[in-house]
Structure formats: structure tokens, C-alpha cells
Image (cartoon, rainbow, N blue to C red):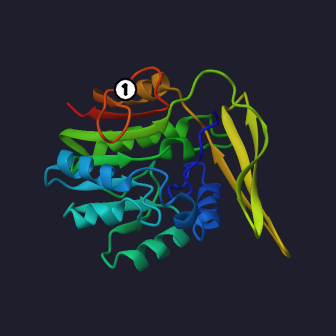
Amino acid sequence: MTPRPDPGTTTEASSGRGRPAAYGDAFADVYDEWYGEVTDAEATADVVADLAAGRRVLELGVGTGRLAAPLIRRGVRLVGVDASAAMLERLARRLPHPLGVRADMAALPVADATIGLVLCAVNTVFNLVDTPPTPPGRTQRAAFAEAARVLEPGGLFLVETTVVTTDPPPAGVSVTRRSADGLVLAATRFDPHTGVVAGQHVELGPGHLRVRPWWIRPLTPAAIDALAAAVGLVPAHHWADWSQRPFTADDPVRITAYRRP
């Protein structure tokens, strides 16, 4: 299965092409309606608050605040980064606290060793896509390096992703949403040279047509572990969901807590 991008989590890529910000802006108006319940936000906040234990938390791709809101309610000292101005405007309406910063995940405006936990939820790492001449994967590597840099010794980097296999994702068109007023089609295409899946959500209705583009670069669990190892992060836990059930090879989602020694 091709992993779904998370339109609520966007970042500027180091290539400076501006694509991710446009991507977030394209989905901001429908994110809470379409993806507000994509995962259990309350369970996520319970685990993050417990693991943070009073230390500062940084959410990569804070989006409209789907996770930020329950984290704030639990008293978590939170700051979030996102590339999309439209997403951050919606975050500011939801939460009056000045916690959202427009920034690049690959160049965080955060001092070294000042964060107790970094949260990278729901395929956010897949959203880090480079375009030529930038080599594929550079921004994903840079984001892991930045997470390691800002973590305190003993701090945790939580990464939640759909489990991806080495099989090429299928290309094609499918119906993702249907109502009496119209439907939403998803069209995808895979580039085997870069590992990037390019897609569009196409909304069709009476007198209405809107195209919302997106790009992701899916990674297998082994590839994600390798990114973490390359920057000195050590896996502490592998979970299948936010109940912290141990991950198995048959699970569709993996949440890994990497620790900075």
C-alpha cells in the first residue's frame, strides 16, 4: 500500500524549491475535516506527555494543531515547526499560544541540546522530498541530523510511519472520498530513480474542480533505522500503535523511539 502523505505536516526542503509550503497551503482548508482522526491524537498526547516528563517537546510539522492541542491540554511545553503559512494560521486560531514557527525541518531554529523529545508523526518524514539536482534523500538525512542536534542527552526522537516494503508502490487512480455532492480522486505515480511518489487529490463536484498536489519519499523501517544510526541515535522502543504494543513484522504502522546517548 502506498503510504498516505500527511497534509498537516510540511517542511521546506533544502533545495529551496518551495514545493512543500505550497503542498501544505493546498490542504490546510480541508485537513481537519479529512484527516482530523487519522490517528488517535489523545493516545499520542498521553504517550508524548509521559515520555517528555516535563522537558520541552518539538513537533516537526505541527500543521493545524491536531496533536498540539491535546499536548497543550496536558501541560506539555511545546513548540512546533511547519513550512506552510496557511497551516500555521489555522494553528494560531485553534491555539492562542505562540507555539508555531515557520521553519525548515532540515535547518531547525533551535539551539543545540535544548529539547527533551522530538515528535515526527504520521509519515512526516516521508514528506521530505528533494528535486534535482539535490540528491534524493538529502533532506531526510538532514532532518534526522537536526533532530539529533537539538536533543538533550537522553532525549527521544519519536518517528511514526506506515510500514513500507521494498516493492514499488502501484501507480493509478482511486476514489478516496465520496459524498452526495461529489468525490475525491487520488492519482499517483512512482519514480524508481528517486523513490518519490507524486500524487494529486482531485476534487470533483457540481461546478467545482480543485487539484491538490503532494509528493512523498517513502522509506522502509530499515532505511529509517539507518538514518537514525548515521546520526548516533539508538532505538529504544518499537511500537505498533500508541498503546505501546510491541511492533511485529505484520503490523501496518511502526512508531520508534530513538534515544540520543
Identify which amino acid the numbered label 1 is placed on.
Phe
Query: Is residue 134 toward the left or the right of residue 38 in the image?
Result: right
Inspect this view and state whether residue 185 appears.
Answer: yes
Looking at the image, the residue that sits furthest to the left is 54
Q: At numbered mark 1, what does the secondary structure look like: helix, strand or loop?
A: loop
> In which quadrant will I find the C terminus?
top left
Total numbered circles:
1
Q: Is residue 121 found left or right of 238 in the rendered image?
A: right
Task: Provide residue 74's location: percent of width, then percent of height.
Answer: 21, 62
Can you say which quadrant of the picture contains the N terminus? top right
Q: Residue at x 43, y 51 (%)?
A: 107
Question: Is 196 located above or below residue 251 in the figure?
Answer: below
Q: Which residue is mark 1?
A: 247
Quick one: 26 or 47, which is closer to the camera?
Answer: 47
Location of residue 140 with respect to 41 vertically, above or below:
above
Query: Which quadrant of the structure image shows residue 247?
Result: top left
Q: Is residue 111 visible?
A: no
Q: Quadrant of residue 18?
A: bottom right
Relative to 218, 79 lies left or right: left
Q: Nearer the viewer, residue 151 or 219?
A: 219
Which of these two is toward me, 250 or 154? 250
Residue 154, horizontal then vertical, whole percent? 17, 37
Residue 148 position, x and y percent, is 31, 39
Point 50% across, 55% down: residue: 9
